[in-house]
């Protein structure tokens, strides 16, 4: 049995608000289907001196039947265009896809916290 889930548009807005509440910034890079679209979260990590590295996270199936956030792509500092190409390919594969970019300290911890809350009994009702 699958758990109820938020509409994608509402979840994207909530992710941005969560980043802002934690001192970060967020924006939608690609809008997909408002109700049932898939979400990719791009976390930007400031490396100092104007350098940033990006990592993409997607909700993927696990062996125990649940779905959880997992890193699907990391930006290569030597070839940053490859990451952008990856996002373009994902959009071409799935026009319903939402891409939400978050610039936040400890972005991976934010993702881990999302995973913990989503997999608790009673989450979303």
Image (cartoon, rainbow, N blue to C red):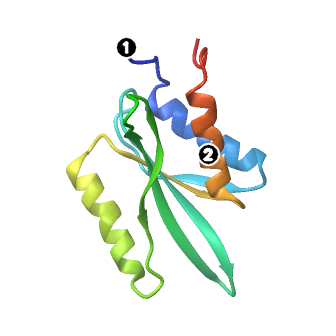
Q: Considering depth in this image, is 70 or 10 the residue closer to the camera?
A: 70
Tag 2 secondary structure: helix
Seen at 69% across and 42% down, the residue is 18
On the rendered structure, is 125 left or right of 17? left
Q: Looking at the figure, which quarter contains the C terminus? A: top right
Residue assigned mark 2: 112
Seen at 40% across and 30% down, the residue is 64
| Circle 1 crowding by C-alpha within 10 Å: few under 14, some 14–19, many from 20 | few
**Above or below, 77 relative to 40:** below
**Above or below, 14 relative to 108:** above
On the image, the x and y values in percent for residue 96 come to 30, 40
Q: Looking at the figure, which quarter contains the N terminus? A: top left
Q: CA distance from mark 2 to mark 1?
A: 23 Å
| Circle 2 crowding by C-alpha within 10 Å: few under 14, some 14–19, many from 20 | few
Q: Considering depth in this image, is 92 or 62 the residue closer to the camera?
A: 62
Among numbered discs 2 and 1, the one appearing first in the sequence: 1
Seen at 29% across and 62% down, the residue is 88
On the image, the x and y values in percent for residue 102 come to 59, 56
Tag 1 secondary structure: loop
Q: Considering depth in this image, is 61 or 13 the residue closer to the camera?
A: 61
**Above or below, 78 relative to 64:** below
In the displayed orientation, state which residue is furthest to the front.
Answer: 64
Residue assigned mark 1: 1
Cβ atoms at labels 2 and 1 below 8 Å apart: no
Q: How many marks?
A: 2
Q: Considering depth in this image, is 72 or 102 the residue closer to the camera?
A: 72
On the rendered structure, is 24 left or right of 95? right
On the image, the x and y values in percent for residue 72 come to 40, 57
On the image, the x and y values in percent for residue 12 come to 53, 39
Residue 49's mark?
Answer: none
On the rendered structure, is 121 left or right of 94? right
Seen at 66% across and 48% down, the residue is 110
């Amino acid at each position: 049995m699958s758990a109820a889930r938020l509409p994608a548009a509402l979840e994207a807005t909530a992710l941005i608000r969560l980043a802002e509440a934690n001192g970060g910034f967020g924006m939608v890079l690609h809008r997909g289907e408002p109700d049932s679209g898939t979400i990719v979260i791009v976390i930007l990590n400031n490396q100092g001196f104007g350098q940033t590295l990006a990592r993409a996270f997607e909700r993927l199936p696990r062996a125990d039947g649940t779905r959880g956030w997992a890193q699907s792509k990391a930006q290569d500092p030597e070839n940053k265009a490859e990451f952008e190409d990856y996002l373009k390919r994902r959009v071409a594969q799935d026009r319903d896809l939402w891409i939400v970019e978050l610039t936040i300290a400890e972005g991976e911890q934010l993702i881990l916290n999302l995973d913990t809350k989503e997999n608790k009994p009673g989450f979303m009702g």
